[in-house]
Amino acid sequence: MEKIKVGVLGCTGAVGQKLVSLLGRHPFFEISELVASEKSAGMKYAERTSWREASPMPGYVRDIVIKSPCEELDARILFSGLDASVAGEIESDYAGRGYAVVSNSRNHRMDEFVPLVIPEVNGSHIAMVRDQETYKKSGGFIVTNPNCSTIVLALALYPIYRDFGVDKAMVTTMQAISGGGYPGVPSMDILGNVVPHISGEEQKMETELLKIFGSYDGNHVSNADITVSASCNRVPVRDGHTMSVSFSTCREATSEDLIKSLCSYEDLELNLSPDQVVAYMDDPARPQPLLDSATGGGMTVTVGNLRKCPVLGWKFNAFGHNTVRGAAGAAILNAELLVKEGFV
Amino acid sequence: MEKIKVGVLGCTGAVGQKLVSLLGRHPFFEISELVASEKSAGMKYAERTSWREASPMPGYVRDIVIKSPCEELDARILFSGLDASVAGEIESDYAGRGYAVVSNSRNHRMDEFVPLVIPEVNGSHIAMVRDQETYKKSGGFIVTNPNCSTIVLALALYPIYRDFGVDKAMVTTMQAISGGGYPGVPSMDILGNVVPHISGEEQKMETELLKIFGSYDGNHVSNADITVSASCNRVPVRDGHTMSVSFSTCREATSEDLIKSLCSYEDLELNLSPDQVVAYMDDPARPQPLLDSATGGGMTVTVGNLRKCPVLGWKFNAFGHNTVRGAAGAAILNAELLVKEGFV
Amino acid sequence: MEKIKVGVLGCTGAVGQKLVSLLGRHPFFEISELVASEKSAGMKYAERTSWREASPMPGYVRDIVIKSPCEELDARILFSGLDASVAGEIESDYAGRGYAVVSNSRNHRMDEFVPLVIPEVNGSHIAMVRDQETYKKSGGFIVTNPNCSTIVLALALYPIYRDFGVDKAMVTTMQAISGGGYPGVPSMDILGNVVPHISGEEQKMETELLKIFGSYDGNHVSNADITVSASCNRVPVRDGHTMSVSFSTCREATSEDLIKSLCSYEDLELNLSPDQVVAYMDDPARPQPLLDSATGGGMTVTVGNLRKCPVLGWKFNAFGHNTVRGAAGAAILNAELLVKEGFV
Amino acid sequence: MEKIKVGVLGCTGAVGQKLVSLLGRHPFFEISELVASEKSAGMKYAERTSWREASPMPGYVRDIVIKSPCEELDARILFSGLDASVAGEIESDYAGRGYAVVSNSRNHRMDEFVPLVIPEVNGSHIAMVRDQETYKKSGGFIVTNPNCSTIVLALALYPIYRDFGVDKAMVTTMQAISGGGYPGVPSMDILGNVVPHISGEEQKMETELLKIFGSYDGNHVSNADITVSASCNRVPVRDGHTMSVSFSTCREATSEDLIKSLCSYEDLELNLSPDQVVAYMDDPARPQPLLDSATGGGMTVTVGNLRKCPVLGWKFNAFGHNTVRGAAGAAILNAELLVKEGFV
C-alpha cells in the first residue's frame, strides 16, 4: 500500500510535535508537508523546532522546509494543531481548496456539518462531511476531535450510556500541564500547587459530550439528553488527565454489569486504536498518571474504583493521556477512520 | 489570667509538632506535659524530635521530658494527636482519670455523647460532654474535631446550609501530602502524580458532616438531612486541601445571596478564630494552596468561583489548611471554646 | 523619627512586589511612589498588580497611582527592581536628577564607582558613591547589590576569607524558580526536571565576588585574589538557592576554626540584618529550602555539613533565600546602610 | 542459541523489578528463578509484587513461585538487587555453590578479587573472577557494578582519562528519588525541596572510581592516580542523576579534542550497550532528566556544555539513568560480558 501524504499545520507547537512524532512512525501516513507561522516559513524543521518529545525527531522530517499557512501543499490530509486564534480561518481555507482537514482545534467543533468524532464512540458521524459546502465543491472538508478532557470522559462513559443510559454526569478534572502547550503554564503558578480554573474548559466538557453522544440520522446530529457538570483543575502532573466522575444511569445495573460494559468496546481495526479502548483496574488507587499513561501506547483510557455515589448512584476514577488520546492520537485515529470509510 | 496547663499526646508526630508549634505561642495555654510512645519516654523533647515545622521549636518546651501514655500528668487539657491505632484507649483512659481530652483522632468522633465540633458551626454541641460517663464521675471527657477534609467542607457549606438549606453535596478533594503525616506518602507515589484514593477518607466526609450539621436538643444530636458524596485524591501539594464542590439548595438564592451568606459568620471571640472564617475571592482561579494557605494564619477557609452547576444547581472551589484549620488549630479552637463555656 | 519616602521602580514585577511587601512594614521607610512601564502608568497599584506574595498587599499602597519611568517623584530613595533590559538608562537618569538609586539590577554593578555592596561583608564600599559624577552635581547616585547567588556564596565564604584566606572556590548551585521572575520558567521545563544552565549566571558569580571581597582604599576597589568557578542549575524548588561549595584556604584551619569563623559576623544594627548572618547547622542533611528559607526572616544564610574536600581542602552546603536575602532584602539593607552612614 | 537461565535475587524491590522488566525481553537470558525474603517465598510473583514499572510485567514470570534465599536454584546466573543489609552473605553463599552472581549491591565491590566493572570502561577486569576462592572450587563467583552515580561519572570521564589523563575531578550530583528505592524518600522531605546529603554516597564515588580506572595486570588492580571529590544532593526528579563535573587533565587538549574523545567509545557488541555510550549535546542547557533519560534505552550517558573551569580547567554537565545504566542495566551488561568472555 502506497503511503498517504499528509501535512501538519502548526508543526512546531506542542500538539504539532506530538503529531509529527506519532505520524513519523505511522504505517500508512507519510509526512510530506509542514506548516507553521510566517516567521518559521522557509526554515528546515530540525533547525526551527525546539523538539521536546522524548522520542527523537523522525529522521525524514528533519530537512523538510516549513511552509506558511497560505501555501499550496502536496498532501491529501492536513492535521491541524493550530492555535485557536488562527485555526478557524486557515482550516476553512484549506478545506475550501480540497484538502481533508483533520483538526484538534476547537474552532469548528460545534459547526453544524462538522463531525466531532471519537471513532470508537460515534464513528458514524464522520459521514456528516458529505454535507459540508466545501465537500460538494472541492472534496475538501473538516473533521474534528473533541477537547482532551471531553475525550477521556466520553470514552469512560460511553459504553454505560449505550447499555444503561446516563442522564447526569459530574466530573472534576485534575489536568496535566502539557494541556497548556509550551511555554504554557508558568512554573510559579503550578509547582506544588493546584489551579482550580482552566479557561473555557468546563464549558467544552459540558457541551461537546452532548454532540458526541448525539444520534445522527444521516442529516443532523440530535444532542444527547444528558446533563454534564464539569469542574476543571490544573495539577502539577506532566501528562494525563485524572478525573473523579459521578453519574446516574437510566436503567438499573450492578457494578459487574457496568465493568463488563466498560470493557465491551468492539475492535474497529484501526491502526492506532488500542487493544483495550477502556481498561478497568481493580486497585482502588488506580488509575494514576505515572503508572497508566503508557497503557495502549497512550490510547487506552483507564477506569478504576467503581463504587456507589450517594448522590448520583455511581462514581469512578478515569484517566487518559491528554496529548496522545486527547489530541494528536485522536486526530490521527480520525484520519484512519476517514481512510477506512473511503473519504480520502 | 494565669495560663492553663496543657499536655500534648503524640507530641513527636506531625500533628503533635503542629500542636506544640501553635500552643507554644498561645496567650492562655501553656504546655506542661509532652507524651509519646514508650520508646521516646524519658528523653527531652528537643533531643527526641525531628522538628519539621518552619517556625522554630518553642524554647520552653525543649527540655520537657517526654512521658509515656500511662503516666499521671500535671495538665488540665490534653490535646491528642495520637495515631488512630492507639488513640482510642489512651484517650478513654485519660478522660476516665478526669482530664479534658481534646482529640484530633478519629476514634471517638462518632461516639454517642462525644461532641464533634467546629466552634463556628456547631459550638453548642460541646455541652454533650455533660452526658459522658466519665464527666459525671471524674470531670474528664473527650471532645473531637472532624477530619481535615470534613472541616473545610463544613465551614464552606455551613452558612448556606443554615440560610437556604442544602440537601445534596458532592465534593472532589485534591489533598496535600502533609495529611499523610511523616514519613507518610512515599515520593515515588506522588511526585508528578495524582493518587485517586485515600483510605477511609470518603466515608469520613460522607458521615461526619451529618453529625456536625445535626441539631442538638440538649440530649441527642439528630443527623442533618443532607446527602454527601466525596471523591478523595492526593496531589503533590505540601499543605492545604483544595476542593471542587457542587450542591443543591432547598430554597432559591442568587449568587449574591450565597456569597453574602458565606461571609456572614459571626465573631465568636475565640483567640484562634480568624477575622474571616470564610473568605470569598472574586478571581475564578482562586483559592489556591500557594496563595491562600496563610490566610487568617491558616484558620480561614477560602471559597471562590461560585457558579451554576448544571446538575446540582451550584458549584464553587473551596480550600483550607489541613494541618492548621483541619487538625491542630481545630483542636485548639475547641479547647478555647471549652474554656469560654466553662468546661475547664 | 519621620519616615523616609521611597519609591519602587518596576513595582509590578516579582522583585518589585517583594520590595513593596518588605517595605510596607518597614519601620522607617514609607512607600510614596510606585513606578512601572508606560502601560501600567495611571492605574492604581491594587488594580494593576497581580499580587503573588503570600502576605497581603500593604493597605496604604493599594491606591497609589503608578507613574511612568520618566516622571518626577516625591521620594528620597528609589529601589529598582527593573528588568535589566531597561534598568541601565532609567537608573542613570534618576541618579542624575538627585535620587539615591538602590538597585537590584545587574546593569551598573561593575561600573567603576558604583558600590556592589553586602553591608555585613563590604559595607565600607558604600563610600564610593562620593566619586560618582552625579553625586557631585545633584547628590544622586547608584548603589547595587550582587546577584542572588553571589550574595549567598559571599556571605557563606566571607568570614573564612577574612580569617584564613580563600584562594579557590568552586560552587554548584541548585536555584529556585522564583529567581526567573514571573511568568519566568515554564512548568514544562522544570516540573520533575533539572535545567543545568542559567544564562549569564555563572559569569556573574565568577566576577562579582572579586569586587565584593576587593579592598577599597578610599579611591578604588582592587579585586580580591580569589578564583571562583560556578556551575548553575535550576531545580523545581520555589524559593531559595542551595549550593555545594568547595574551597581552599590560604592558612591552616580546623573545622572548629571554620565554624567559629562562620558564626562570627558582628552586629551592624541594621533593621533587616538578622541575628545570625550565617547560621551553622550540625545536621549533615541541612540546610534545605523547605526547612531553612524562613530563618532570620529570609535574611540568614545557612551553612551545613562542613567536611574535607579531597580536591580543594574543604566543602560545605550553603543556602539562602533568593528573593529576600538575594534581592529585595539585599537592596533594603543597602538603603538602611546608606541612612546609617548619612548618605541619605 | 538456547537461552541462559537466570535468577533474580531481591525480585520484589525496585532494582529487582527493573531487572525483571529488562530481563523479561532479553534475547538470550530467560528468568527461571525469583528469590525474595522468607515472607514472600511460596507466593506467585504477580500476586506478591506491587509492580511499579511503566511497562507491564513480563507474562511468563507472573506465575513463577518465589523462593527464599537459601534454596537451590535452577539458573546459571543470579542477578542480585538485594538490600545491602543482607546481600553480602547471600551472594557469597550462592557464589560458593557454583553460581555466577552478578550484583548491584555495594557489599563486595571493593573485595580484592571481585571485579567492579563497567564493560565499556574496564571490561578486562572481569578476568579477576578466576582468582576468587569459590571459582576455583565450584566455578561460582561474584561480579559487581559500581554505584549508580559512579557509573555515570566514570562513563563521562573515562575517554578523557584514557586520552589526556585526569588527575582531579569534582562532581556535584543532583540525584533522582528512584535511587532511594521504594518507599524510599518521603514526599514530605523532597517535594519542592533539595536534600543536600545521601548517606555514604560521596564516599562511594570518591573510592569506586579509583578501582574502575585502575590498571589490572592479570593479578591485581592498582588504583588509578586520580583524586575525586563528590557532593551529593537529592532533588525532586523521578529518574536520572544530573551532575556538574569539573576536572583537570594531565595533557593539554582543546574542547574539540575532548568532545571527540567523549564520543570515541568503541562498540563492544553487547546487546544492552547503546549505539552511543556517551552522547555529547551542543545545547548548553542539556542534558536534562526529562529530555535525555530515554536516550539509548536509558543506557547512554549524555554530556553537554563543556566549558572552561577557572579552578580545574574544564567543566561539563553529565547525566545518566540511575536505575537502568546505573543499576539493573549495568548488571545485565556485566552478565552479557561474562557470556561473551566465556565465563558462563
Image (cartoon, coloured by chain):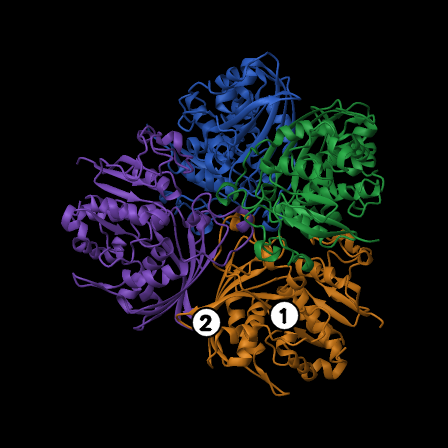
Chain colours: A purple, B orange, C green, D blue
Looking at the picture, tell me which residue is in the foreground, C75 or C107: C75
Q: Is residue C300 above or below residue D320?
A: below
Report in which chain the residue with disc 2 lies.
B
Mark 2 = which residue?
A: B314
The spot of residue C302 in percent (x, y) is 73, 41
- Mark 2 near mark 1, Cβ–Cβ under 8 Å? no
Tell me the residue at 59%/33% (across/down): D106
Q: Earlier in the sequence, mark 2 or mark 1?
A: 1
The spot of residue C43 in percent (x, y) is 58, 55
Tell me the residue at 83%/29% (across/down): C163
Mark 2 falls on what kind of element?
strand
Q: Is residue C73 left or right of residue C199?
A: right
In the image, farthest residue toward the top = D251
Q: Is residue C270 above or below residue C137?
A: below
- Amino acid tagged 2: Trp
Looking at the picture, tell me which residue is in the foreground, A292 or C91: C91
Mark 1 = which residue?
A: B277
Within 10 Å of the Cα at label 1, are there few (<14), some (14-19), or many (20+) other Cα atoms?
many
Disc 2 from disc 1: Cα separation: 21 Å
Same subunit under labels 2 and 1?
A: yes
Q: Is residue C335 above or below residue B320?
A: above
Q: Is residue A288 left or right of residue C255?
A: left
